[in-house]
Amino acid sequence: ENYFSAKSGLYHYLNMADGNYREYLRGEMVRAKKYFYVLRPLLACRWILRTNTPPPMCFTELVAADLPTYLYESVQELLRIKMEVPELKLIPRVDEINNFIEEEFPRLKEKIKSLPEERRQGYDELNELFLKYLQ
């Protein structure tokens, strides 16, 4: 927790979501699992902004905490499809989710810009810990 940077984490997750969105979700037909490559980092950003802590790894925790309620049914349907359909099969784009994604990018970018610069802590303590476990 001494080394967590909210601003760096936000930029990391936002860039991850943006790259995956541009690559996989802008067509008429998409792979269902690719939605999770965008939704998870966006929900991680929302978590960081709300708690100023690292987000959990578990997608269901992020959904429970930060997914807007109007998207819950659509995301549950995507989870069902992901479990039942071969990974390479294409599904029609889910406009409701795409609209949310497209609205989140500018909102999150503005929030990140408004955050103060963070003071960087040295890495001596982390380096010592790393070397300790290498021995």
Image: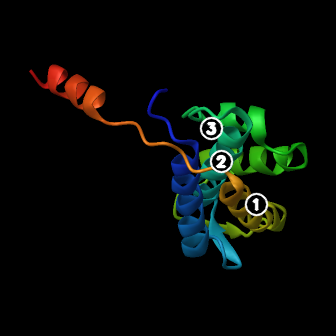
The structure residue drawn at horizontal position 71% and vertical position 56%, both measured from the top left corner, is: 114
Element type at marker 2? Answer: helix
Q: Position of residue 43 (x, y in %)?
A: 68, 46
Label 3 sits on residue: 59
| Rendered image quadrant of residue 51 | top right
Q: Among all residues in the image, which is located at the extreme right?
A: 70
Residues tagged 2 and 1 counted as in contact (Cβ below 8 A): yes
The residue sitting at the left extreme is 135
Residue in the picture at 65% in, 47% down: 45
User: What is the CA distance from the residue labelled 2 to the residue labelled 3?
Assistant: 13 Å
The mark found on residue 45 in the picture is 2
Residue 40 image position (x, y, % from top left): 62, 48
* Tag count: 3
Q: Is residue 18 visible?
A: yes
Q: Position of residue 103 (x, y in %)?
A: 80, 65
Q: Residue at x 73, y 70 (%)?
A: 92
Crowding at mark 3 (Cα within 10 Å: few <14, some 14-19, many 20+): some
Vertical placement of residue 96 versus 51, above or below: below
Q: Is residue 1 left or right of residue 34?
A: left
Is 104 left, or right, of 82 in this rendering?
right
Q: Dot 1, crowdedness within 10 Å: few (<14), some or many (≥20)?
A: some
**Which residue is at 80% across, 61% downward?**
100
Q: Is residue 9 above or below residue 101?
A: above
Q: CA distance from mark 2 to mark 1?
A: 10 Å
Instruction: Give the amino acid type for the residue marked by disc 2 in the picture.
Output: Cys
Is residue 84 visible from the viewing direction of this image?
no
Return the mark for residue 104.
Answer: 1
Q: Dot 3 lies on which element?
A: helix
